[in-house]
Image (tube, helix red, strand yellow):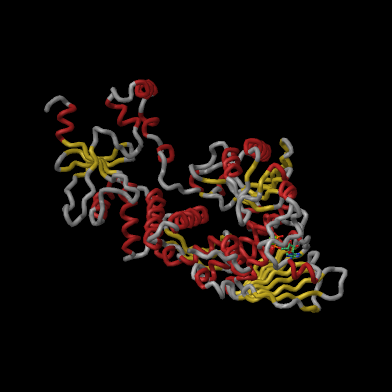
Amino acid sequence: MPVIEVMSETLASQVAAGEVIERPASVIKELIENSVDAGARKIEVEIQRGGIALMRVRDDGCGMSPGDAARSLQRHATSKLRSSDDLNGILTLGFRGEALPSIASVSRFTMLSREAETVEGTEVRVDGGTVHDPKAVGCPVGTSIEVRDLFFNVPARKKFLKAETTEAAHVDHQVRLHALSTPEIGWVLRKDGRVVLDLPATHDRRVRIEAVAGAESGRDLIEIPRWEHRGIKVEGALLPASYARRGRKQQYVFLNGRPVEDSVISRALREAFKGALPEGFQPAAWLWLSMDPSLVDVNVHPAKKEVRFRDGAQIRIAIMDAVEQAMKPKEPEYSPEMIPTHSPSVGEKGDPASATISPELQESNENAPHQNPASTVIKSPPRWRAETQETLPVTEKSIAPAPQFRVIGALSHRYVLLEGEEGLVLLEPSSAHERIIYEKLLLKEEDLEAQGLLVPVLLELDARDVDLLMRHQKHFEDAGFTLESFGGQTVQVGGIPSFLEVKETRAFLVELVDGIIEREGVGRVQRLAYEGFAAKVACAGSRQIQWNIGEIEPLLGRLFACDLPYCDPAGRPVLVQISFQELERKFGRS
Ligand code: ADP
Ligand code: MG
């Protein structure tokens, strides 16, 4: 028979810590939320070795009495919630009363706290959940909490921590996130003794956004003036469509002061751009929403990251209207060359149909797309997959010797016509280039051609992106990038692949970073991430290449030296064949 026992307080806290305390950044989040709730005007955060060795958060908030300081370390001890009714009106960041005991159960924890009206403060030490008797000590007004040796007593969790630089980047993100949410608080972040963020208090949100996001984007900020719809207040700022990125990483949304992520909000932001964004891209935006707290449930996620709206439709309307108002005077422009997409669309490369086919013919195609044989040609996307053409099979170079082709000419400067042994063959030169660049990168035999920049470009990026760039620095070097960390969020780019324009550097780098992030979680991490990276570089690289008919023969030579010459890295055909047999059938001769 199983024997049921009630868990000890320490064990219960460690279990609870599993939900909220995942890594140093989650400790920092809980501690700074407490400082904000305590009414601090200034919050100083310090970490050593990614926070794993030490984290310290100091505030000048209301502090705690000796009794409260001791009680704050008991589970479910909170000054912020008294009855279940209070759950309907939460305006503080914390309310679960779980953070401090959870943190103290998995670290060596010291708290110093003093209220303004007292001369002495209190020190409470906890070692892996064992609480020592509080002591009276001298200390400044406010609270300072020190967390050392995170997870020293739960090795299973410690194993999951990432490299110190990665953990530090997550801490950095948390601090910036909360600093954005509270411009009226001054923030300092120190990493291993060095000040990496020093944000004086301000009443102007724009000043704070600029300080956190970087002056580069600050210049282009579009303000969202205060807008109200059915009691939902929206204000903030956004960046033009050219800054858009995959995923919500550049969206900072604060609901009643709490950073939140929500798909209703990001969808509304995207919709407000009215199709100016490429598929899957999200605008950069900073939004402060405020509404009656009873209209939103914040108690749906242990780390309080997600919320549930009573009426999502109204939120959507409020945000869309606010953004549309903000963009009215000056519509943002989307220039396709600013954001490389996975694969160029028909329109990007110039639709051959619109250039060469008369409107009448186009019309008749629409009416009878399958009866008119021309329609399959005109209406299909640039890489034909119509039934009348067969795609050459994907075969390994070792099995199939390079076929012999005679170059006949070019078709609308998009395809090359070749005569092959079995009939007419069409070559898509940019797909061929893609394949060649891709395999060159995978083989890593030679680096891609690079251009040194006379004046290096300094890019200010999200700290997590910088971390990722630096971790994959070698890949970027192979692709022709010379990157150097310039401290904090700045990366110095000294060289770029020769196919890239200087002004595209930022957009291209972040696109690559996003690609790596997308694939990092998939397993076989390194290989997959690198393949995805190489495919993106190849795709962007091939788009820049202007070909002329005289270069086709050497191109074919390089193509057939590849392992898989018949398809590009995305699996699209490089060559399409129309056999003599097929032609004979069409001409009624077979
Ligand atoms: P919660 O924030 O959910 O109430 P915590 O475990 O984070 O739970 O904190 C417990 C209590 O300790 C808080 O309700 C608050 O009264 C007190 N407290 C924690 N940190 C601070 C701080 N920095 N300044 C003042 N009081 C604090
Ligand atoms: Mg708290």
411 vs 290, left or right, is: left
- Residue drawn 64% across and 47% down? 238
Return the x and y of residue 146 as percentages of the image width and height: 68, 73
> Which quadrant holds the C terminus?
top left
Q: How many marks?
A: 0
Residue at 41%, 64% (x, y): give it: 475
Residue 295, image x and y in percent?
69, 42
Residue 127 coordinates in the image, percent (x, y): 64, 76
Front residue of 197/292: it is 292
> Which of the four quarters of the rendered structure image does ligand 2 lie in?
bottom right
Q: Is residue 488 visible from the viewing direction of this image?
A: no
Q: Nearer the viewer, residue 469 or 402?
A: 469
Examine the rendered structure and indicate whether residue 394 appears above or below residue 466: above
Residue displayed at 58% across by 39% down: 273
502 relative position to 369: left or right: right
Residue 304 seen in this snapshot:
yes
Left or right placement of residue 176 versus residue 337 in this view:
right
Q: Position of residue 163 (x, y in %)?
A: 51, 70
Q: Quadrant of residue 391?
A: top left
Q: Residue furthest front?
A: 1
- Looking at the image, residue 34 sits to the left or right of residue 364; the answer is right
